[in-house]
Image: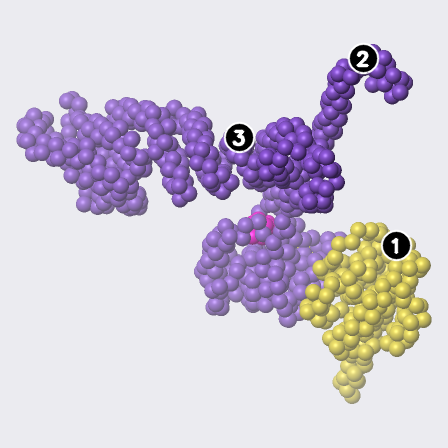
Chain colours: A yellow, B purple
């Protein structure tokens, strides 16, 4: 516990959102532990931290796995406020979960008040392509509307699992750097002035 | 007649042989009759076999349903056990919650206590908190460590109090005192379980309106408890007490069967088709209607198919028809048919009685329900007495089985017994209202059952060496429901008293001896009683108050009672005993022996004297005696009267005698002992 208070690697906070049962926890656990959890137990709210190497730089990823169930909707705002990037997950075998993404997107935009917040639309369970209920082009159209990337994943086969997380933290990281620059730039003139 | 069974039997050959053998018409007639008789016998036998098989089948089906219900019970018990185990393993952490769901009522009291304790704790311990906590439900409390959200460095030690609608966060200061930091509404905070991976263990993240905070619990169990409790607070208004689903009830098989049987019996309505008016004109020379000649067969079939009601009504109809048609000489075979019907009637009765006696079940209610159908028919057939006798036998079995089971499960057997008795009596009276002979059978039966019950009671509850307290409790429990039976017109209290009397008397005698022995062994110091502390004295005074005696007048100083210790002990014991005796004395028969017990015990204690070699203050000895006579005895008499509702003459006499005595011997005693003291 008594670690040095030195500034550790950058911490990026990712939040998993989406309806109940679409596979948020399965994706998270696959990413964290390389394992697929078959049995379903509704999540309340779990958070995970992991050190990863992103483009040669060590960063920490903090994943908040939220509850999809409707009865937690009231406190979702609280969770969303702390997020820096969002994986909005639905199941390609469940049209309702796809429709629900619209609501999640709206709620996130309302809470964060930022149209360009790092955000990925994730169609999970792509290994069950034969049971697909949501046509691919519909997903792509929606992603385009929101101007966010669309990725199909499978927590079971680990397809694109790392990709969605890394794409998201890369986005978060670059935005942070961008902002630091923005902050630093107006600061630069002051030493100039002192020189003068 | 063996040749009929032969495989190559041919009718022509047999007839030819028969005619060759026989001499004259009369012989042939004789043979014909024999063959007819054989025919009838065979058909009867066939039907009997059929019925036997059928009964066997029903028996087996019953057995199966019985087993099934047992399986249900078993699974029920297993579920219960599992629930108990679950509560136990969850242990302290969730015991409050679980208790809620199992029996909300009993835990309500403890919950209240917890609430008030927690509220007080918060008020006393937390500096700077002045919110109102009245009416809130306490959920959890505990110490946690607040961590830095980024690198999990510990920041400070905190203490949480969680109520249903407020989470109070306090800082633990260096002197272990708590300082109020802030409070949150549990409905507006979000709890995140931080999965243990690297660095941090047992931590939760609480997102509050002031931002996200990380708290660490010392144990993993503590963490999961906090997550659960915060969740509970979050949902408190939505679902106050999650009730567990009832275990599946065993389906009521016997009822179903009965319904099936009833519906079966309702279906065959062939009888009206063959009404006498239709059938009569058919045969000209013989006016016996066809339905009448086949009635006997029909009845057999109906019985075999268990359509007892139909069989009974057919019997009734034939009998009525025959008695009406009696004067008509044209009815051939009337006597034969009548005899046959009579036989069938007898058979039906036997079958029904068999049914009745088979219906004993472990559950009296079920047995009584099963019995109703055959009972009704038997009553209609005028077989009430046989039916009542069988019914009572069935009830006896059920009753005794139920009691045995209750005893094994440590359940209230007297309550059960009298309830069952009432049940039987009610059912019985409604079935045999019009038969006074049957009602007296019921009375006899009740007495027999009562005797059995009393013998069981004596054997298992009133054994030798049972304390009077236990005896009093037991007898009280029996008496109360017994008197209730008078409501349905059964007065068995007196009989019951009679049955228990000898046992109770010997028990009273035995306790008397035991108590007197104990008095004899008393070691008395004849010194005032020092209770050492004020609170001890206070407690003793309150205890005696509860028993109805006030000894405040005897206190001296802060901790002294100017009575000996054994006097005080005796006062307590005697008053308790009076209460138990009073309880037992509600029945008149025991009054005398109980009075004697109290009197002898009192006298024995009153007669205690200090040994001659002990130096004591005779005034103090006297004071104790006088206290016993003047204070204790009247209170005891009054108490006895109140509990038993009877006067206690013997004790009164004792009182007057002793108080008269007291005047005289005082100076004499003083003169004896003065030399020792002064």
**Discs 1 and 2 lie in a common subunit:** no
- Judged by depth in the image, the label closer to the viewer, 1 or 2, is 2
Please give left or right for residue A106 compared with residue B437 in the image: right
Disc 1/disc 3 C-alpha distance (Å): 76 Å
User: Are there few (<14), some (14-19), or many (20+) residues within 10 Å of tag 1?
Assistant: many
- In magenta, the rendered stretch is B93-100
For disc 1, the marked residue is A156
| Depth check, front residue: B101 or B619 | B101
Please name the residue shown 82% across and 59% down the image: A23
For disc 2, the marked residue is B22
| Residue B99 inside the magenta-drawn segment | yes
Quarter placement of the N terminus of chain B: top right
SS of the residue at dot 3? helix
Disc 3/disc 2 C-alpha distance (Å): 49 Å
Please give left or right for residue B603 compared with residue A188 in the image: left
Q: Position of residue B234 (x, y in %)?
A: 62, 63
Q: Position of residue A150 (x, y in %)?
A: 90, 69
For disc 3, the marked residue is B386
Return the chain for callout 2: B
Disc 1/disc 2 C-alpha distance (Å): 98 Å
Please name the residue shown 72% across and 26% down the image: B44
Q: Position of residue B260 (x, y in %)?
A: 69, 43
| Depth check, front residue: B523 or B71 | B71
| Depth check, front residue: A46 or B580 | B580
| Residue B299 inside the magenta-drawn segment | no
* N-terminal label among 3 and 2: 2
User: Are there few (<14), some (14-19), or many (20+) residues within 10 Å of tag 3?
Assistant: some
SS of the residue at dot 2? loop
Pointer 3 with pointer 2, Cβ within 8 A: no
């Amino acid at each position: 516990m008594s670690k040095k208070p030195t500034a550790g690697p950058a911490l990026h906070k990712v939040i998993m959102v989406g309806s109940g049962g679409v596979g948020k926890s399965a994706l998270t656990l696959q990413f964290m532990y390389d394992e697929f959890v078959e049995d379903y137990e509704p999540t309340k709210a779990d958070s995970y931290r992991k050190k990863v190497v992103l483009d040669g730089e060590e960063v920490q990823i903090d994943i908040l796995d939220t509850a999809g169930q409707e009865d937690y909707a009231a406190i979702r705002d609280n969770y969303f406020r702390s997020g820096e990037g969002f994986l909005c997950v639905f199941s390609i075998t469940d049209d309702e979960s796809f429709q629900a993404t619209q609501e999640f997107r709206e709620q996130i935009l309302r809470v964060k008040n930022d149209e360009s917040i790092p955000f990925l639309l994730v169609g999970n369970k792509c290994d069950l392509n034969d049971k697909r209920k949501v046509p691919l082009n519909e997903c792509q159209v929606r992603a385009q509307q929101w101007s966010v990337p669309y990725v199909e994943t499978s927590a079971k086969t680990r397809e694109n699992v790392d990709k969605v997380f890394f794409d998201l933290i890369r986005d978060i990281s670059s935005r942070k750097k961008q902002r630091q620059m923005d902050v630093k730039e107006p600061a630069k003139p002051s030493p100039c002035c002192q020189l003068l | 007649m063996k040749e009929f069974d032969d495989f190559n039997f041919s009718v022509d050959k047999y007839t030819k042989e028969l005619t060759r053998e026989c001499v004259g018409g009369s012989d042939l007639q004789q043979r014909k009759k024999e063959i007819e008789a054989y025919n009838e016998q065979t058909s009867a036998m066939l039907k009997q076999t059929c019925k036997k098989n059928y009964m066997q089948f029903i028996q087996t089906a019953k057995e199966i349903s019985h087993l099934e219900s047992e399986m249900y019970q078993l699974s029920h018990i297993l579920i219960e056990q599992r629930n108990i185990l679950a509560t136990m393993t969850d242990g302290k952490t969730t015991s409050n919650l679980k208790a809620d769901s199992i029996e909300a009522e009993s835990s309500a009291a403890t919950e209240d206590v917890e609430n008030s304790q927690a509220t007080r704790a918060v008020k006393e311990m937390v500096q700077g908190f002045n919110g109102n906590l009245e009416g809130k439900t306490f959920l959890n409390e505990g110490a946690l460590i607040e961590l830095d959200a980024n690198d999990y460095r510990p920041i400070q030690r905190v203490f949480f109090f969680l109520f249903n609608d407020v989470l109070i966060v306090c800082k633990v200061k260096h002197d272990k005192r708590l300082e109020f930091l802030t409070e949150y509404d549990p409905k507006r905070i979000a709890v995140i379980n931080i999965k243990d991976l690297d660095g941090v263990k047992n931590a939760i993240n609480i997102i509050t309106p002031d931002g996200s905070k990380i708290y660490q619990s010392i144990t993993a169990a503590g963490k999961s408890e906090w997550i659960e409790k915060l969740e509970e607070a979050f949902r408190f208004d939505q679902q106050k007490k999650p009730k567990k689903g009832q275990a599946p009830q065993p389906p009521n098989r016997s009822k179903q069967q009965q319904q099936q049987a009833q519906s079966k019996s309702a279906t065959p309505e062939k009888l009206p088709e063959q009404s006498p008016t239709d059938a009569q004109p058919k045969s000209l020379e013989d006016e016996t209607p066809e339905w009448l000649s086949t009635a006997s067969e029909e009845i057999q079939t109906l019985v075999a198919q268990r359509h007892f009601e139909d069989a009974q009504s057919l019997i009734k109809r034939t009998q009525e028809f025959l008695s009406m048609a009696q004067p008509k000489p044209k009815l051939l075979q009337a006597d034969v048919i009548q005899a046959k019907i009579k036989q069938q009637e007898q058979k039906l009765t036997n079958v029904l009685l068999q049914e009745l006696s088979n219906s004993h079940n472990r559950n009296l209610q079920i047995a009584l329900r099963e019995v109703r159908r055959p009972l009704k028919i038997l009553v209609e057939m005028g077989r009430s007495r046989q039916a009542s006798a069988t019914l009572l036998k069935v009830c006896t079995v059920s009753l005794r089985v139920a009691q045995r089971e209750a005893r094994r499960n440590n359940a209230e057997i007297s309550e059960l017994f009298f309830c069952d008795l009432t049940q039987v009596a009610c059912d019985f009276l409604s079935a045999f209202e019009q038969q006074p002979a049957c009602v007296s059978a019921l009375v006899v039966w009740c007495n027999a059952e009562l005797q059995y019950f009393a013998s069981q009671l004596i054997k298992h509850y009133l054994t030798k060496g049972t304390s009077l307290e236990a005896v009093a409790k037991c007898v009280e429990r029996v008496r109360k429901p017994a008197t209730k039976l008078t409501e349905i017109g059964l007065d068995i209290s007196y009989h019951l008293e009679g049955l228990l009397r000898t046992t109770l008397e010997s028990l009273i005698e035995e306790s008397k001896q035991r108590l007197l022995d104990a008095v004899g062994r008393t070691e008395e110091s004849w010194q005032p009683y020092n209770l050492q502390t004020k609170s001890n004295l206070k407690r003793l005074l309150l205890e005696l108050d509860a028993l109805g005696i006030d000894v405040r007048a005897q206190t001296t100083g802060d901790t002294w009672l100017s009575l000996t210790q054994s006097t005080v002990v005796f006062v307590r014991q005697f008053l308790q005993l009076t209460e138990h005796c009073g309880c037992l004395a509600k029945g008149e028969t025991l009054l005398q022996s109980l009075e004697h017990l109290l009197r002898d015990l009192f006298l024995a204690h009153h007669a205690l004297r200090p040994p001659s070699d002990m130096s004591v203050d005779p005034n103090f000895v006297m004071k104790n005696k006088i206290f016993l006579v003047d204070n204790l005895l009247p209170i005891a008499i009054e108490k006895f009267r109140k509990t038993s509702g009877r006067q206690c003459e013997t004790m009164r006499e004792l009182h007057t005698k002793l108080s008269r005595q007291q005047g005289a011997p005082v100076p004499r005693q003083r003169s004896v002992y003065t030399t020792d003291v002064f």
